Image (tube, rainbow, N blue to C red):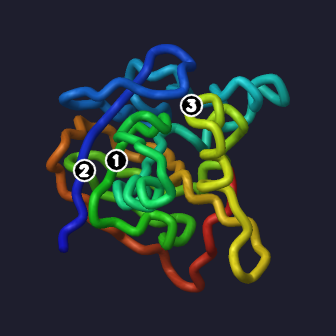
Amino acid sequence: MTASVLAVHLSPTHSFSKARRDQITLVAGRGVEGDAHCGETVRHRSRVAADPTQPNLRQVHLIHRELFDVLAHAGYRVLPGELGENITTDGLAVLELPEGTRLHIGPALITVTGLRNPCQQINSFAPGLLKQVLRRGENGRIERLAGIMGVIDRGGTVRPGDEVRVELPARPHRPLERV
């Protein structure tokens, strides 16, 4: 199966969910044009409060459509964009990608920086949902299932239906950590 873009989203405000769009424009070194999180330095409020000069390693947020199937099985109806992602993928195991993976989507190029660290805000969207996307695995380690973050190396327009081509980094691969 070829990986592809299922849907794209943005929000000009720091709202939890993002509105579906026909296309989004990725801007190199900044993020999604028109999105509240677009910028060279951090834009997430908690990170700005800690140190507003930090580089923005969370310029674009991707979630795999398959997560919604897992959540539905647990009794949660979640649609693309509702968890705040910019790009919903289909057929791509995003959580299994190593740090530094490059994703070619249409003309754009994204470098994966790490895992999204879901926060308590997710329970405001649906009570109990945080326990579904932030949990302890069988090995006792914390599992973060709410998607991945990346930076834009080459900008361009991304649309639903665009193919996602994966370019793995050189070995040894480093597992994704929270960013």
Vertical placement of residue 177 versus 42, above or below:
below
Circles 3 and 2, Cβ within 8 Å, touching? The answer is: no
Q: Earlier in the sequence, mark 1 or mark 2?
A: 2
Query: Mark 2 highlights which residue?
Result: 5
Residue at (43, 34) in percent of width and height: 82
Q: Are marks 3 and 1 in contact (CB under 8 Å)?
A: no
Instruction: Please say if the residues under marks 1 and 2 sit with CB atoms less than 8 Å apart.
Output: yes
Measuring from the top left, give residue 4's x and y in whole percent: 22, 57
Of residues 44 and 172, the one drawn nearer to the viewer in this rendering: 44
Label 3 and label 1: CA atoms lie apart by: 18 Å
Q: Calculate the distance from the C-alpha at mark 1 to the C-alpha at mark 2.
A: 6 Å
Give the x, y percent position of residue 108.
29, 46
At numbered mark 2, what does the secondary structure look like: helix, strand or loop?
strand
Under circle 1, the secondary element is: strand
The amino acid marked with disc number 2 is: Val
Task: Please tell me which residue lies in front, 43 or 19.
Answer: 19
Q: Residue at x 71, y 24 (%)?
A: 45
In the image, what residue occupies the spot 19% across and 57% down?
163
Q: Which residue is mark 1?
A: 88
Residue at the far front in the pictured view: 75
In depth, the one of 64 and 42 nearer the eye is 64
Residue under the image location 62 percent in, 73 percent down: 175
Q: Using residue 106 as the reference point, say whether residue 142 is left or right of it.
A: right
> Which quadrant of the rendered structure holds the N terminus?
bottom left
